[in-house]
Image: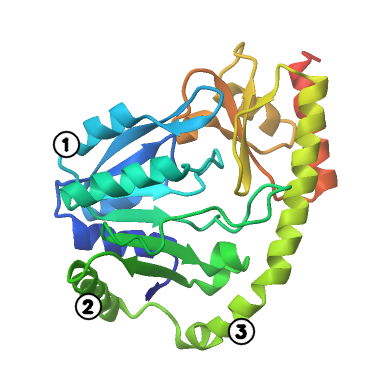
Amino acid sequence: MVLTAGTSEAYAHLFRMLADPGECLLVPTPGYPMFGPIAALEGIRLEPYRVAWDGAWHLDLGDFERALATGPRGVIVVQPAVPAGSSFDAPERAVIVARCAERGIPLIADEVFAEFPWPPATAAVPGFAGTGEALTFVLGGLSKACGLPQLKLSWIVVSGPEPARRAALEGLEWISDLFLTVATPVQLALPTLLDSRTAFRARVLERLGANLGHLVRLEQRRPEVRRVGGEAGWSAVLQLPARRTGEHWALDLLERGVAAHPGEFYDLEGGAYLVVSLLPPPQEFDRGLAVLEERVAGA
């Protein structure tokens, strides 16, 4: 395991270790917009592969194979995904690992939201840790696990075949020694902080359940508002009437004091989408949904 000062730094370390300027890594789409600026800073390219929606989210295997043919230096998966909260099932995970192993392509698995399944589920989302076939880097951190983003500590768990795993650890340790960004106090406090995460996780799961319940009731009252899949994480995707774009819906709500992201931020295509946080206090979240319902009704 290698410690970093946040997941963004973990990505930067991995990008500079795995790829030279001008080379590419694969990223899922829809996906998290953070990848682009970090890749640009490191001078590398991102090649998207499609995660498709057809009533459920799934890997577009044909598009994944196309992207692999471009010769990437690594593949990024986000499990559960941002913003959709979707996860690859066991056969899809097996295919991803097998394809990476066959081609000697490292796998970067961002699993920061894995411990936050949507009720009634309670078990963490299955991930890629311990994969033996392909060189794999699993990312986590205090920001999500304990709700402590200010402490700036994340980790990279490395697994895979020797000697690739050993060489990767040596490379990451060398890069980390150059920057020395992780403060000693938070390193020493890490075991205690991780022991405390159970209570935080329980509070978050309770809030997720309450706010998802509000969404279900909104869908029952307004079938034209539809939650687009998802099973874990801190955000949900809503499909709205296409008489406006997602950006126009988001701006309209913002004028009325309600903040949501347009789906365009995450390359969601084929309709008008909003991405809403599931973390506000339930009463506040319900008030926001009331404004959205009013606007959808054309009031």
Helix, strand or loop status at disc 1: loop
Identified by mark 3, the residue type is Thr
Q: Which mark is residue 232?
A: none
* Residue 73 visible (yes or no): no
The x, y position of residue 157, in whole percent, is 38, 69
Asked if residue 162 lies left or right of residue 51, the reply is left
Comparing 181 with 54, the one in front is: 54
- The residue tagged 1 is 70
Disc number lying in front (2 or 3): 3
Identified by mark 2, the residue type is Trp
Above-or-below relation of 241 to 116: above
Above-or-below relation of 14 to 78: below
Give me the residue at 14% from left, 55% from top.
Answer: 20
- The residue tagged 2 is 174
Q: Looking at the rendering, which quadrant does residue 55 occupy?
A: top right
* Residue 108 visible (yes or no): yes
Asked if residue 247 lies left or right of residue 60, the reply is right
Give me the residue at 61% from left, 42% from top.
Answer: 231
Quadrant for the C terminus, please: top right
- The residue tagged 3 is 192
The x, y position of residue 43, in whole percent, is 20, 50
Give me the residue at 19% from left, 67% from top.
Answer: 164
Between the C-alphas of marks 2 and 3, the distance is 27 Å
Between the C-alphas of marks 1 and 3, the distance is 44 Å
The x, y position of residue 286, in whole percent, is 82, 38
Identified by mark 1, the residue type is Thr
